[in-house]
Amino acid sequence: MAFRNAAFHLKQIHARITRNRLTTVFFLFALFHCFAQGIIQSLLFTVDARYSSFLFDIAAHLPPASHTDLALHGSGYQLKLCDYIPHNAADCSIVFDSTQNTTVDKTDPTTDAQLRGQIIISQLDRSSFTITTDIQQNVVTQVTFQADNKGGQLNMSSTCVKTLLYPAQQQVATPSLVSPLILPLSLSAFKTANERTSHSLVVLITRITLTAWSIYALWRTGWQQSVFEQMIEAPSTPCSAAMFGQYFSTRIMYEIPDLILNCTALGISTFLSWTLLRAYNVEVFTYVGAPKEIQKLYKYFLALQVCLQLETFVLITAAALWADQLFNTYINHISTHTGIYEALMIFYAIVLAPWLLMAWYGIRYEKRLVTIAFIFAGAVFTIVGALMFDSQVYQWTFYAWPCFGCFVTASLILLVASNVLGIVCLRNFGKGLAQFLYAESNLSSSNFAQEVFERDVEASYVDDEKLKDKGLHADFTTHYLPTLGPV
């Protein structure tokens, strides 16, 4: 019996995906876009990995709590090395200031920035190079990079090592960007299989977000290239090693097609989503014939669904990024309230699923106590998220890592929107929305319209204006039945 039910549902999903050209193209387009972007992101991750291994090997000789702070200083940049948060004068020291004249390490016989950079680049794909340190009074005074196969030797001063900590900590966490690629594909499958309008809107919003991030990522790559040239590659810098030229040119080579792909996907997805959205909305309100007041309430419910679907993804991703920073970076050596942060993450993990269930069940069936509990839990989430900014390490992570900052900001905005929409839905209980949702769900799940009667949404469209011109227009009034639904 279970096998028959599974086979039946698979056939139903296949029928809905291949229902017409629009649904088929929408699903195939999402599959192709996810596959293409996955390849591009994996290539970007490979480029980052080549350099991150070398940079972390160099930075590992510094104290574990060390981190850098880059700030604008006049017409240039000033880099500070700090070992505590907040950054007080006693806890930070200036490593590099582009407005001042600096000289390359005179203990290195090779002062050619291009040659020094080539020695490092030639060893990035090897694992046999050696790094040795000279330590005096527990302070690293010099790091020696010895290439294999007589590739050469570089002496890096302590100032150079501290400078290289900045690019080491700026490596993009590419794996965190895999989930936004999978989200549109999975939601497209759910949308075409279940014909949910909220999924169409979530897919569209996700496409807009991915496109905006691609634009920002391309700009940030160019900006970082300029900073690294001034701070690391110029002949007058402490490192004087032109080692990032190939890195940035390769990243830009991949980021440009990524941006083009996202812009194209956004345009196509907007057209397909809007077309399917109109078709589904017409069918949803045709099932029962809801009046305008019910349609308005349904839009509030739909907006809440969109916010909750986005919030689920955004909140989980933000918590995962924060956990990664808290346990795997220098934050772990600085934070004094790690136990509290762990407790909050466990609280979110336990309460999130019941919170989402309360929203769906409470508002769909107009259960006041359940809906009030949902609003209360959402308010607690919002307050806790806002109070987190009282933490110095959280503030710093929000400021220093744009990816994390974007997810946290989006999470708070969606939490506030979910609470407001929950209150609006609560105030409109008893006006017929529950009965409409019950009737619409039963008629849709029973294949009342499109699955039983073969018809093409695109081919079955009738223009009322043309009928009026031909004198064939008739007003077919649909009467709403407010008593539908469970008693």
Image: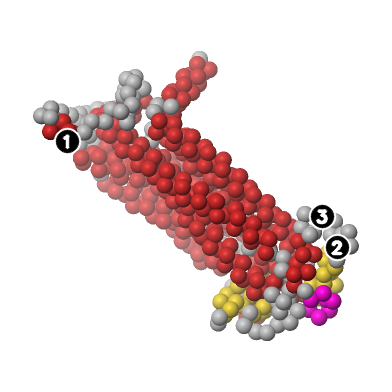
Q: Percent from the top left, x then y, of residue 337? A: 60, 62
Dot 3, crowdedness within 10 Å: few (<14), some or many (≥20)? few
Give the residue type that dot 2 points to: Gly
State the predominant SS element of the stretch in magenta.
loop
Q: Is residue 282 left or right of residue 154?
A: left
Q: Where are the magenta residues, as a range?
A: 105-111
Q: Percent from the top left, x then y, of residue 240? A: 73, 74
Mark 3–mark 1 CB contact (< 8 Å): no
Asked whether residue 68 is in view, the answer is no
Dot 1, crowdedness within 10 Å: few (<14), some or many (≥20)? few
Picture quarter containing residue 164? bottom right
Q: Magenta includes 59? A: no
Q: Percent from the top left, x then y, of residue 128? A: 85, 56
Picture quarter containing residue 364? top left
Compared to 221, does 194 lie above or below?
Answer: above
Report the colour scheme: secondary structure
What label does residue 465 carry, if any? 1
The quadrant of the image that shows the C terminus is top left
Of the numbered discs 3 and 2, the one sitting upstream in the chain is: 3
How many numbered tags mark residues here? 3
Give the residue type that dot 1 points to: Glu
Q: Percent from the top left, x then y, of residue 25? A: 44, 34
Structural distance between the alpha carbons of marks 3 and 1:
73 Å
What secondary structure is marked by label 2?
loop
What label does residue 127 carry, if any? 3
